[in-house]
Every structure is written in structure tokens, then in C-alpha cells.
């Protein structure tokens, strides 16, 4: 083996140069990077490129350049950008792609335009489902144009837009999938916005716009066209001082009206106008009206909570549903009035700051509660008809007065449970009741049925605590006895603990019902009408009386032979006397 040590000869230096060029790594020659090559040979099918640093010449298919529209680049000396896919494939050749390089370069430009919010130039090349395909003119990249982003107004035909270079705005980029979405509408709107801002800046609050044309209306207002340059809105509340339900009640499409500018919003590029402010405010005439006086008003609008009425043209007032009737709550305004009705009302409130006037219809009619109080004062016996009832009360209608008197179940009877007694009465029944309470301001009348009957509790008026009475046992259960005092219509309960002193004898089951027994009054309260009866108390009273009557105050007299010493003393005295 021969080793060359002398590298000074020309052949050795040439070999060293070739070797260094082969193994020196060029940082630009990395797989996945876009590089530039020079055409050094062209055949019928291929284009050969010269790229310094590669061990072989990359080859491009001539058809690839044709599909890209770059056939004019297939000339010796022209430069072409390609993507270096492989430095060496299985065959030892370098793989490059011009089309992939174009896509990568195009995507980079799109990302830069998107980040800088800059428009790009493109042309619509075809239609697809949901929109169109746009080709980026600089790079040939394809992007999606949604149908909603073609224009700021619906277009039935877009043939005039096809293949025409125009500006688009990038609105979405998917870097992972490599998809781009553009908008033509944003470009159009931005131009219009700049033009609209110039137009809006010309208006000032207080300006009068002459001959604006009614363009359209909705439930909240009317739109007017101003000289074909700007659309302005007149809100429903700014159309007239009178209440109106919809602009079509006042306007017709194509009519001309003068407008007053009341607001200018340069951020939203909106101009607000008013028609009613061109005429005097009818509220200035409110000084012609006085509180608590009756006036004729006209119903102009019905709502769930009340009705809007007019004292005169444009001078609106509110009639709340609570001010329609004296006795009915949550009155349906629509069932009582209709638009156009003229009714009598009293002015109850005038708020000059808020320009509000409140009125009342019920104040123009007689208060039925005051009429009732005059005709049937408290403690009067009246006859009423049951018109309704609920789980705890009955409502009665008295005479022809349109009010209901309240009868609680506790005021039905003295004898039984009030809720049980309530079940006996039906709608249409006639009852004679006593007026117990009248609250005119609160619109309440309370009556009672049991107050018209003899109070069975009066039986206890001459009774006292500890007094003995005779009762009849009505029934018994584990809790005690139900008894009725003789001569009284009321039932009372003797608790189990009050049946006997001896616990063994305090059994309700000892009694079957119908027996007559004596008991004592343990408690009596005439005000609250409460009575407590006790057999045990009677036994205690009787035992106490027996002890005080038959025993001595000395200790031990209650024992069986406590009196034996007294008997012996008596015998001794008899012997001495003899």
C-alpha cells in the first residue's frame, strides 16, 4: 500500500479541493428548505438545475413547470426556486420540487399578510359548495371564499367577478392543515366605512335634515334615506308625542319628512333623528290641568299592566290596572277598554321632571266599600250569597254591591271544627251574617255567622274554678274522654292524666260512652273561651274535704287505732263518777 505524503504537486491539490467541496456541509442545503437553482440544460421532458454544493444535478419534470405556468422559466440561465426534499434517494439522486416550493413561499406570504392585517391580491377561479375558490396572484396558493363573504349584500350572479384581480382580506388561517379563508365583503365594508365616516362627520346635533325619504320600518322605529348617502333611524318614541304601536300607522314608504338630528355616534357611524322634536312638547300644557279633578281621556294603547291615554293630542297619561276597579285585582285592561274609548279619569300624580302623568278611573265611580259602611255599619245583620270559597273561608256577595265579604271558617260555628263546618256550604247558599269589621282603605269586609247564634259558652258565665258539674261521656280513646256538660251544647276533652288520682284507674277504656259522671272545673277563661275539666281534681277536692271534716289536727289521727286512748279515758271517768 502506497501512502502519499507529498501534497505539493498540482494533482494532489486538485484532489484535496474536490474532497473538501464534497464533505463541507452547506447550511442552506438542508432537506425541507427552499433553495434556488440555475437552469443549465433543457430536454423535451426534463430541466436540469445547477445548485452548488450538491453532488449531482437536480432534475425537474417539464410537465410540473407547465402546470404551474412557469414553462417560460425552462431556459438556460433562468433561476427556479425548488424545495429540497431528499439529498439522496435510493438511486443516489437529489429530489427537488418546484410546486411544493411555490406553496411554501405562498403560505409564508399569507402568514405575513395575516399577521400584519394587510389585504392580498387574488382572483375567483371557480365555485364550490358554500362559496368560491380564490387563487393568490403572487404565489398561486388556493384559498376559500365563503358565500356570505362575497359581498355586503346578496348577489344572485357573480360572473362579473370571476378571474378578475381584486383585493381580499385573510380572515382565518389554519397553520396545521394549511388552509386559508378570505373575505371580499370586509374589503368592501372597509371602503364604505371610510366613506360613511366622512358623511357622518358632517352632521351635528340640532341639524335639520330636509326631505328625508321613508325607506322602511320595523317594530322599534322607522328608517329614512338621506340624499342616497346615509340611512338614519327615527326611534318609535321619537316619531310622535302620541302613543303609536307601529310606524306604519303614521308613515308610507316613499314619503318625505323633515328630521332633527338628536345624536351622532362616530364609533358606530350612526345618526339618530327625531320628528316629534320639530314641534312643541304638549306636556307644556300640563299646567292647564289640576290634580284630583275629573277629565275625559282617550285610550290610545293597551298593555298588560294598564292603558296609555291622552288628555289631549300628544299629552300621554298612564292608567294602571290597579286604578280601574275598587274590588278587583289584576284587572284585564283589554277586557274593559278598547283603543279609541273615551273614559272619565282623575289625575292622581304629575311628575314634571320625568314628564309622567298618572290617572285613576275608579276614583270617578263611587267606592262600594264606603257605600257598604254607610248602609251596613259594624254589628249589622245582613244576608249574603255564597259566591266562592277556598280551603279556609267563604266569600259572600251582599245586595247588588260589587264587593265580596270575607267569612273565615272559625267564624262559622261555636260547636264543631270550622273546616268541617265549611264543607257543608256550597255556592249559591244564602246566609245571614253579622258585620264584624270594615276596612275601607284596605278594601276588606269581615263577617261572621256564629256571631248571629247564641254563644254556648255563655253557660259558663256563672261558673267558677273548682266547681263541680255533671257531664255525659260522648266517647273515649287512648288520649282521654270527650264529654258534654248537662245543659251545654259544647263538647270538651278530659285528658287521660285528669281522669283519676290513681294512675291505674286513669284508663279511658273504663268508660264506654253514655255514662253520667261528676268532674270539677280546673280552668275557665271567659275572654279566650277556654275551659279545662278534670275528674282527678274533683277527687282531690273531695278527699281534702273528708280529711278536714272527720280528722283531728293532732299527728297520728289518720292511723287505724289513733282514737283508742280517748275511749279508755272516757271509761275511767265513768268509774270515778260512780
Image (tube, grey):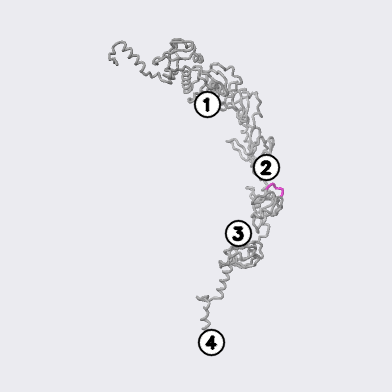
Residue contact between numbered discs 4 and 1, judged by CB atoms under 8 Å: no
Q: Is residue 46 above or below residue 415?
A: above
Q: Is residue 527 depicted above or below 54 in this figure?
A: below
Measure the C-alpha gap from mark 3 to mark 1: 76 Å
Res 528 label: 3
Q: Nearer the viewer, mark 1 or mark 2?
A: 1
* Quarter of the picture holding the N terminus: top left
According to the picture, the residue beneath numbered tag 2 turns out to be 364
Label 1's element? loop
Q: Are marks 3 and 1 in contact (CB under 8 Å)?
A: no
Bounds of the magenta segment: 399-403
Mark 1 burial class by Cα count in 10 Å: few <14, some 14-19, many 20+: few
Q: Residue at x 53, y 79 (%)?
A: 563
Task: Please determine whether, in this image, residue 136 is positioned above or below residue 490.
Answer: above
Residue tagged by mark 4?
A: 574
Disc 2 and disc 4: Cα gap in Å?
Answer: 108 Å
Whichever of callouts 4 and 1 sits on the residue coming sooner in the sequence is 1
Pick the residue in front: 119 or 223.
119
Amino acid at each position: 500500500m502506497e501512502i502519499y505524503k507529498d501534497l505539493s504537486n498540482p494533482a494532489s491539490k486538485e484532489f484535496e479541493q474536490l474532497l473538501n467541496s464534497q464533505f463541507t456541509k452547506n447550511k442552506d442545503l438542508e432537506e425541507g428548505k427552499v433553495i434556488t437553482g440555475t437552469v443549465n440544460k433543457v430536454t423535451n421532458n426534463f430541466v436540469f438545475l445547477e445548485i452548488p454544493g450538491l453532488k449531482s444535478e437536480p432534475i425537474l419534470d417539464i410537465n410540473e413547470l407547465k402546470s404551474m405556468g412557469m414553462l417560460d422559466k425552462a431556459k438556460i440561465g433562468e433561476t427556479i426556486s425548488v424545495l429540497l426534499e431528499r439529498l439522496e434517494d435510493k438511486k443516489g439522486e437529489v429530489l427537488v420540487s418546484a410546486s411544493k416550493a411555490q406553496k411554501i413561499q405562498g403560505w409564508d406570504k399569507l402568514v405575513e399578510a395575516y399577521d400584519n392585517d394587510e389585504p392580498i391580491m387574488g382572483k375567483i377561479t371557480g365555485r364550490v359548495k358554500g362559496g368560491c375558490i380564490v387563487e393568490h396572484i403572487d404565489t398561486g396558493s388556493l384559498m376559500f371564499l365563503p358565500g356570505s363573504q362575497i359581498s355586503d349584500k346578496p348577489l344572485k350572479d357573480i360572473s362579473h367577478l370571476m378571474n378578475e384581480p381584486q383585493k381580499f382580506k385573510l380572515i382565518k388561517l389554519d397553520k396545521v392543515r394549511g388552509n386559508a379563508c378570505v373575505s371580499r365583503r370586509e374589503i368592501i365594508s372597509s371602503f364604505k366605512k371610510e366613506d360613511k365616516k366622512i358623511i357622518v362627520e358632517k352632521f351635528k346635533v340640532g341639524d335639520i335634515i330636509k326631505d328625508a325619504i321613508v325607506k322602511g320600518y320595523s317594530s322599534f322605529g322607522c328608517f329614512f334615506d338621506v340624499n342616497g348617502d346615509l340611512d338614519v333611524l327615527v326611534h318609535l318614541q321619537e316619531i310622535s308625542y302620541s302613543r303609536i304601536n307601529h310606524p306604519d300607522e303614521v308613515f308610507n314608504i316613499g314619503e318625505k319628512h323633515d328630521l332633527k338630528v338628536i345624536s351622532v355616534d362616530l364609533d358606530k357611524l350612526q345618526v339618530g333623528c327625531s320628528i316629534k322634536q320639530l314641534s312643541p312638547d304638549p306636556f307644556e300644557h300640563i299646567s292647564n290641568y289640576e290634580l284630583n279633578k275629573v277629565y275625559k281621556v282617550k285610550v290610545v294603547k293597551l298593555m298588560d299592566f294598564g292603558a296609555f291615554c291622552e288628555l289631549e293630542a300628544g299629552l300621554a297619561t298612564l292608567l294602571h290596572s290597579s286604578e280601574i276597579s275598587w274590588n278587583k285585582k289584576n284587572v284585564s285592561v283589554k277586557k274593559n277598554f278598547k283603543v279609541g274609548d273615551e273614559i272619565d279619569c282623575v289625575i292622581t300624580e304629575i311628575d314634571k321632571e320625568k314628564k309622567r302623568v298618572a290617572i285613576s278611573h275608579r276614583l270617578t265611580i263611587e267606592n262600594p266599600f264606603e257605600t257598604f259602611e254607610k248602609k251596613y255599619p259594624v254589628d249589622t245583620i245582613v244576608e249574603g250569597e255564597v259566591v266562592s270559597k277556598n280551603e279556609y273561608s267563604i266569600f259572600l256577595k251582599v245586595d247588588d254591591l260589587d264587593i265580596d265579604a270575607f267569612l273565615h271558617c272559625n267564624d262559622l260555628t261555636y260547636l264543631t271544627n270550622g273546616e268541617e263546618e265549611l264543607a257543608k256550604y256550597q255556592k249559591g247558599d244564602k246566609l245571614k251574617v253579622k258585620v264584624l269589621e270594615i276596612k275601607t282603605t284596605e278594601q276588606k269586609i269581615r263577617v261572621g255567622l256564629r256571631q248571629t247564634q247564641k254563644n254556648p259558652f255563655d253557660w259558663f258565665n256563672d261558673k267558677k274554678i273548682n266547681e263541680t258539674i255533671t257531664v255525659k261521656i260522648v266517647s273515649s280513646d287512648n288520649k282521654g274522654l270527650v264529654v258534654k256538660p248537662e245543659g251545654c251544647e259544647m263538647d270538651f276533652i278530659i285528658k287521660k292524666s285528669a281522669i283519676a288520682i290513681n294512675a291505674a284507674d286513669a284508663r279511658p277504656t273504663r268508660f264506654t260512652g253514655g255514662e253520667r259522671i261528676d268532674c270539677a272545673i280546673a280552668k275557665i277563661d271567659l275572654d279566650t273561651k277556654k275551659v279545662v275539666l278534670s275528674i282527678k281534681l274533683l277527687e282531690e277536692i273531695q278527699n281534702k274535704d273528708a280529711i278536714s271534716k272527720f280528722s283531728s289536727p293532732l299527728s297520728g289521727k289518720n292511723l287505724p287505732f289513733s282514737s283508742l286512748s280517748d275511749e279508755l279515758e272516757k271509761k275511767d271517768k265513768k268509774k270515778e263518777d260512780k
